[in-house]
Amino acid sequence: MHNIAILASGSGSNAENIVRFFHSGHDVRVAVVLSNRSDAGVHDRMNRLGVETITLGNDIWSTHPAEVIAELQARDIELVVLAGFLRKIHPDIVTAYQGRMLNIHPSLLPAYGGKGMYGHHIHEAVIAAGERESGVTVHFVSNEMDKGRIIVQERVTISDDETPDSLEEKIHHLEYNIYPRAIAATLGIK
Ligand code: GRF
Protein backbone atom coordinates (compact mmCIF):
# COMPACT_ATOMS: atom_id res chain seq x y z
CA MET A 1 0.00 0.00 0.00
CA HIS A 2 1.31 3.46 -0.95
CA ASN A 3 0.36 6.18 1.53
CA ILE A 4 0.09 9.66 0.09
CA ALA A 5 -0.71 13.02 1.71
CA ILE A 6 -2.50 15.92 0.06
CA LEU A 7 -1.82 19.56 0.95
CA ALA A 8 -4.72 21.91 0.20
CA SER A 9 -5.81 25.44 1.15
CA GLY A 10 -9.05 25.77 -0.80
CA SER A 11 -12.13 24.04 -2.09
CA GLY A 12 -10.36 20.73 -2.57
CA SER A 13 -12.02 19.51 -5.74
CA ASN A 14 -8.73 18.02 -6.93
CA ALA A 15 -8.24 16.39 -3.53
CA GLU A 16 -11.70 14.82 -3.80
CA ASN A 17 -11.00 13.62 -7.32
CA ILE A 18 -7.72 12.02 -6.23
CA VAL A 19 -9.37 10.24 -3.29
CA ARG A 20 -12.20 8.93 -5.49
CA PHE A 21 -9.74 7.76 -8.15
CA PHE A 22 -7.42 5.84 -5.81
CA HIS A 23 -9.90 4.55 -3.26
CA SER A 24 -11.71 2.61 -5.95
CA GLY A 25 -9.31 -0.24 -6.25
CA HIS A 26 -5.73 1.02 -6.44
CA ASP A 27 -2.98 0.29 -3.93
CA VAL A 28 -2.86 3.94 -2.94
CA ARG A 29 -4.42 5.50 0.13
CA VAL A 30 -4.80 9.19 0.88
CA ALA A 31 -3.73 8.89 4.52
CA VAL A 32 -4.15 12.53 5.48
CA VAL A 33 -4.93 15.98 4.11
CA LEU A 34 -2.93 18.82 5.62
CA SER A 35 -4.25 22.35 5.33
CA ASN A 36 -3.17 25.76 6.55
CA ARG A 37 -6.82 26.89 6.83
CA SER A 38 -9.45 25.47 9.14
CA ASP A 39 -12.20 27.08 7.00
CA ALA A 40 -11.08 25.52 3.70
CA GLY A 41 -13.75 23.62 1.77
CA VAL A 42 -11.44 20.61 1.55
CA HIS A 43 -12.28 19.65 5.17
CA ASP A 44 -15.97 19.04 4.41
CA ARG A 45 -15.16 17.11 1.28
CA MET A 46 -12.72 14.86 3.17
CA ASN A 47 -15.08 14.40 6.12
CA ARG A 48 -17.68 13.06 3.70
CA LEU A 49 -15.10 10.66 2.25
CA GLY A 50 -13.75 9.57 5.64
CA VAL A 51 -10.26 11.01 5.09
CA GLU A 52 -8.47 12.57 8.06
CA THR A 53 -7.65 16.28 7.78
CA ILE A 54 -5.35 18.35 9.96
CA THR A 55 -4.99 22.12 10.05
CA LEU A 56 -1.54 23.48 10.81
CA GLY A 57 -1.42 27.27 11.12
CA ASN A 58 0.67 29.45 8.85
CA ASP A 59 3.29 29.94 11.58
CA ILE A 60 3.91 26.19 11.65
CA TRP A 61 4.39 26.04 7.88
CA SER A 62 6.85 28.94 7.94
CA THR A 63 8.78 28.44 11.18
CA HIS A 64 8.22 24.88 12.46
CA PRO A 65 8.64 22.65 9.39
CA ALA A 66 9.68 19.74 11.64
CA GLU A 67 6.08 19.55 12.87
CA VAL A 68 4.84 19.13 9.31
CA ILE A 69 7.48 16.51 8.58
CA ALA A 70 6.56 14.66 11.80
CA GLU A 71 2.90 14.43 10.72
CA LEU A 72 3.98 13.03 7.35
CA GLN A 73 6.47 10.56 8.81
CA ALA A 74 3.96 9.35 11.40
CA ARG A 75 1.79 8.16 8.51
CA ASP A 76 4.61 6.68 6.45
CA ILE A 77 3.90 9.06 3.57
CA GLU A 78 5.64 8.14 0.33
CA LEU A 79 4.43 11.02 -1.83
CA VAL A 80 3.20 14.51 -0.94
CA VAL A 81 0.68 15.97 -3.37
CA LEU A 82 -0.07 19.70 -3.43
CA ALA A 83 -3.56 20.47 -4.72
CA GLY A 84 -4.31 24.16 -4.41
CA PHE A 85 -1.94 24.70 -1.49
CA LEU A 86 -1.25 28.41 -1.30
CA ARG A 87 1.91 28.58 0.79
CA LYS A 88 5.53 28.32 -0.17
CA ILE A 89 6.93 25.02 1.11
CA HIS A 90 9.69 25.41 3.69
CA PRO A 91 13.11 24.29 2.33
CA ASP A 92 13.40 21.65 5.10
CA ILE A 93 10.20 20.02 3.85
CA VAL A 94 11.38 20.24 0.24
CA THR A 95 14.62 18.51 1.25
CA ALA A 96 12.82 15.80 3.25
CA TYR A 97 10.56 14.99 0.28
CA GLN A 98 12.94 15.74 -2.62
CA GLY A 99 11.58 14.06 -5.74
CA ARG A 100 8.56 12.91 -3.69
CA MET A 101 6.46 16.08 -3.72
CA LEU A 102 4.24 17.12 -6.64
CA ASN A 103 2.28 20.24 -7.48
CA ILE A 104 -0.33 20.98 -10.10
CA HIS A 105 -0.44 24.44 -11.64
CA PRO A 106 -3.21 25.69 -13.95
CA SER A 107 -1.03 27.17 -16.69
CA LEU A 108 1.66 26.09 -19.12
CA LEU A 109 4.65 26.72 -16.86
CA PRO A 110 6.98 28.58 -16.94
CA ALA A 111 4.31 30.94 -18.32
CA TYR A 112 2.00 32.43 -15.68
CA GLY A 113 3.85 30.98 -12.70
CA GLY A 114 5.48 32.45 -9.60
CA LYS A 115 4.37 34.97 -7.02
CA GLY A 116 0.78 36.20 -7.32
CA MET A 117 -0.02 33.64 -10.01
CA TYR A 118 -2.68 31.46 -8.44
CA GLY A 119 -6.34 30.65 -8.99
CA HIS A 120 -8.40 33.14 -10.93
CA HIS A 121 -5.48 35.57 -11.29
CA ILE A 122 -3.85 33.16 -13.71
CA HIS A 123 -6.89 32.75 -15.95
CA GLU A 124 -7.54 36.51 -15.94
CA ALA A 125 -3.94 37.20 -16.98
CA VAL A 126 -4.01 34.56 -19.71
CA ILE A 127 -7.21 35.96 -21.24
CA ALA A 128 -6.03 39.58 -20.89
CA ALA A 129 -2.84 38.69 -22.79
CA GLY A 130 -4.90 37.28 -25.67
CA GLU A 131 -3.35 33.82 -25.44
CA ARG A 132 -4.75 31.19 -27.80
CA GLU A 133 -4.01 28.30 -25.48
CA SER A 134 -3.40 27.51 -21.83
CA GLY A 135 -3.15 24.28 -19.89
CA VAL A 136 -2.04 22.38 -16.85
CA THR A 137 1.41 21.50 -15.54
CA VAL A 138 2.31 18.81 -12.99
CA HIS A 139 5.81 19.29 -11.61
CA PHE A 140 8.06 18.36 -8.72
CA VAL A 141 8.24 20.91 -5.92
CA SER A 142 11.58 22.67 -5.55
CA ASN A 143 12.71 25.70 -3.58
CA GLU A 144 11.78 28.04 -6.40
CA MET A 145 8.04 28.49 -6.71
CA ASP A 146 6.55 26.77 -9.79
CA LYS A 147 10.01 25.94 -11.16
CA GLY A 148 10.59 22.29 -10.28
CA ARG A 149 11.09 19.66 -12.97
CA ILE A 150 8.01 19.23 -15.14
CA ILE A 151 6.41 15.77 -15.16
CA VAL A 152 3.54 16.36 -17.58
CA GLN A 153 1.87 19.24 -19.34
CA GLU A 154 -1.41 19.27 -21.28
CA ARG A 155 -2.99 22.04 -23.33
CA VAL A 156 -6.43 23.52 -23.85
CA THR A 157 -7.49 25.79 -26.68
CA ILE A 158 -8.89 29.17 -25.73
CA SER A 159 -12.04 30.03 -27.67
CA ASP A 160 -12.94 33.52 -28.91
CA ASP A 161 -15.59 33.99 -26.23
CA GLU A 162 -13.54 32.45 -23.39
CA THR A 163 -13.87 34.05 -19.95
CA PRO A 164 -11.65 33.45 -16.90
CA ASP A 165 -14.50 31.36 -15.41
CA SER A 166 -14.99 29.17 -18.46
CA LEU A 167 -11.23 28.69 -18.78
CA GLU A 168 -11.00 27.73 -15.12
CA GLU A 169 -13.70 25.11 -15.64
CA LYS A 170 -11.96 23.65 -18.71
CA ILE A 171 -8.70 23.50 -16.81
CA HIS A 172 -10.25 21.86 -13.76
CA HIS A 173 -11.56 19.04 -15.97
CA LEU A 174 -8.12 18.58 -17.45
CA GLU A 175 -6.63 18.50 -13.94
CA TYR A 176 -9.03 15.77 -12.81
CA ASN A 177 -7.85 13.69 -15.72
CA ILE A 178 -4.08 14.17 -15.52
CA TYR A 179 -3.26 14.53 -11.81
CA PRO A 180 -4.20 11.00 -10.63
CA ARG A 181 -2.32 9.53 -13.59
CA ALA A 182 0.77 11.63 -12.85
CA ILE A 183 0.63 10.54 -9.19
CA ALA A 184 0.33 6.89 -10.18
CA ALA A 185 3.23 7.20 -12.61
CA THR A 186 5.43 8.84 -9.96
CA LEU A 187 4.60 6.01 -7.55
CA GLY A 188 5.55 3.53 -10.26
CA ILE A 189 2.04 2.15 -10.62
CA LYS A 190 0.75 1.31 -14.08
C1 GRF B 1 -6.25 24.12 -9.16
O1 GRF B 1 -6.56 24.85 -10.30
C2 GRF B 1 -4.78 23.82 -9.08
O2 GRF B 1 -4.17 23.73 -10.31
C3 GRF B 1 -4.24 25.03 -8.35
O3 GRF B 1 -5.24 25.36 -7.43
C4 GRF B 1 -6.51 24.93 -7.89
C5 GRF B 1 -7.13 24.12 -6.79
O4 GRF B 1 -8.47 23.86 -7.03
N1 GRF B 1 -2.95 24.76 -7.81
P1 GRF B 1 -9.27 22.86 -6.09
O5 GRF B 1 -9.19 23.41 -4.66
O6 GRF B 1 -8.66 21.52 -6.22
O7 GRF B 1 -10.68 22.92 -6.62
Image (cartoon, grey):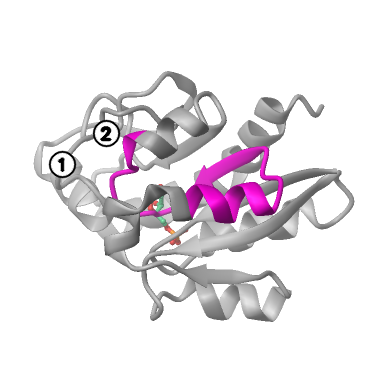
Q: Which residue is mark 2?
A: 145
Instruction: Pick out the residue farthest to the right.
Output: 25
For the residue marked with disc 2, what is the amino acid?
A: Met
The foreground one among 127 and 74 is: 74
Quadrant position of residue 119: bottom left
What kind of element bears circle 1?
loop
- CB under 8 Å between discs 2 and 1: yes
Q: Mark 2 to mark 1: distance in Å?
A: 7 Å
The image quadrant in which ligand 1 is located:
bottom left
Secondary structure, mark 2, is loop
Please name the amino acid that badge 1 sits on.
Lys
* Residue 107: quadrant of the picture: top left
Q: Is residue 85 magenta?
A: yes
The front one of 95 and 23 is 95
User: Few, some or many C-alpha atoms within 10 Å of disc 2 (few <14, some 14-19, many ≥20)?
Assistant: few
- Looking at mark 2, is its residue's CB closer than 8 Å to ligand 1? no
Which quadrant holds residue 26? top right
Residue sitting at 18 percent across and 53 percent down? 121
Residue 155 point in image, percent of width and height: 42, 30
Q: Is residue 155 visible?
A: no
Q: Which mark is residue 115?
A: 1
Instruction: Report the number of discs.
Output: 2
Is the C terminus in the top left, top right, bottom left or bottom right quadrant? Answer: top right
Please give the range of residues in magenta: 68-91
Residue that appears at 40% across and 54% down: 84
Can you name the residue that lies furthest to the top here? 149
Rendering coords of residue 57 (x, y %):
34, 68
